[in-house]
Amino acid sequence: MSDVQMLRVRLGISEIDSYSMLFYSHYLRYNERAANFCLSLESSSAVLRRVAVAKYMSSVRWNDTVDIRTTAVAEPSADGEYMLLHEWFVAEQYEKPAYLSLCTYVVCGSVGFTGARTPDVKGARRIQALQREAGLLFTPHGGGGCSETLPVYPDMIGPGGSLAVPCVMDLFERQRTTLIGGQEELERLKAEDGTLIVVYMIQALELPPATAVRPREEIDVTTARCRHRARHRARHRARHRARHRARHRARHRARHCARHRARHRARHRARHRVPPRRSRGPPGTEGLHAR
């Protein structure tokens, strides 16, 4: 696959959230545009099917000029699905990506992404690092979630009959805000503590296939609190190291105290000329002296 020019976009005011940043669902929309930008002329469209991992590394703001570079990760699967790496660069800072994601697309056509880059050594390492992070999934952790039933309106359905990507992310955002405490809590944290709660990573996002929902249908949306496996393992390793250090220090103190007592006894005997203790001879030899 040959290199082509990266897709350049300029962000409008309608895509910015209350924190003056690009709303995170629009990243996926622009990823889909970048994928279609790299399509061959024989293919008609590429539809986003899943996101293995997406990392929001730095903020993208209104009026920023963004270059989106698309790299082919591997050959298409047997189902005709293609995985692409999207890298976002703000203000032509090509050594410092603002956003990274591994996305899988379904292509209408047989040729695929002839305009996507082939990964170089640095790109291959970046892909491997993202794939490792994609494997460290979050796991459900206790209660504290929420669930609600919502109707599907015609404007929520995108091309092909599936839920539009911005709609899916908007449903997630509604429940995320509810779990935090509502808009009032977000405003209080921002005003009093200067705390901004933002999405920094998305993992294993599976978009519903076409014709999964119909207008005026009701869907159940459920959100649960999760725990990151890597962080859980890190805490476990930290506790294990702490116990190991404590045992090591205890053994070290015991050996140090034993050596200190032995040196103290030796100095005491030398100072007071106390003969060292002699072991007793065999039984029955008490009082016998050699001539």
Image: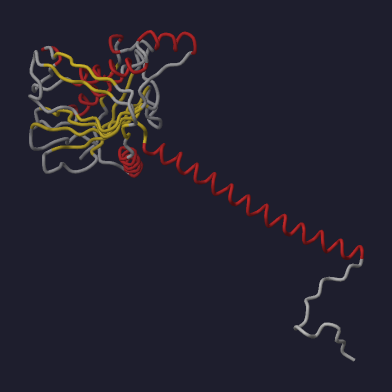
In the image, residue 260 lies at what x, y percent?
A: 76, 57
In the image, residue 262 lies at what x, y percent?
A: 77, 61
The picture quadrant where one finds residue 199 is top left
Work out which residue is located at the far bottom of the displayed protein and give it.
291
Quadrant holding the N terminus: top left
Image coloring type: secondary structure
The picture quadrant where one finds residue 156 is top left
Quadrant holding the C terminus: bottom right
Q: Is residue 91 or residue 19 the one in the foreground?
A: 19
Q: For this view, does 120 lie left or right of residue 289?
A: left
Q: Residue at 30% across / 15% down in the picture?
A: 11
Work out which residue is located at the far front of the displayed protein and give it.
284
In the image, residue 129 lies at what x, y percent?
A: 35, 41
For residue 131, above or below residue 25: below
Q: Residue at 11% across / 39% down in the picture?
A: 80
For residue 222, above or below residue 250: above
Q: Residue at 72% across / 58% down in the picture?
A: 258
Work out which residue is located at the far right of the displayed protein and give it.
272
In the image, residue 29 lies at what x, y percent?
A: 22, 22
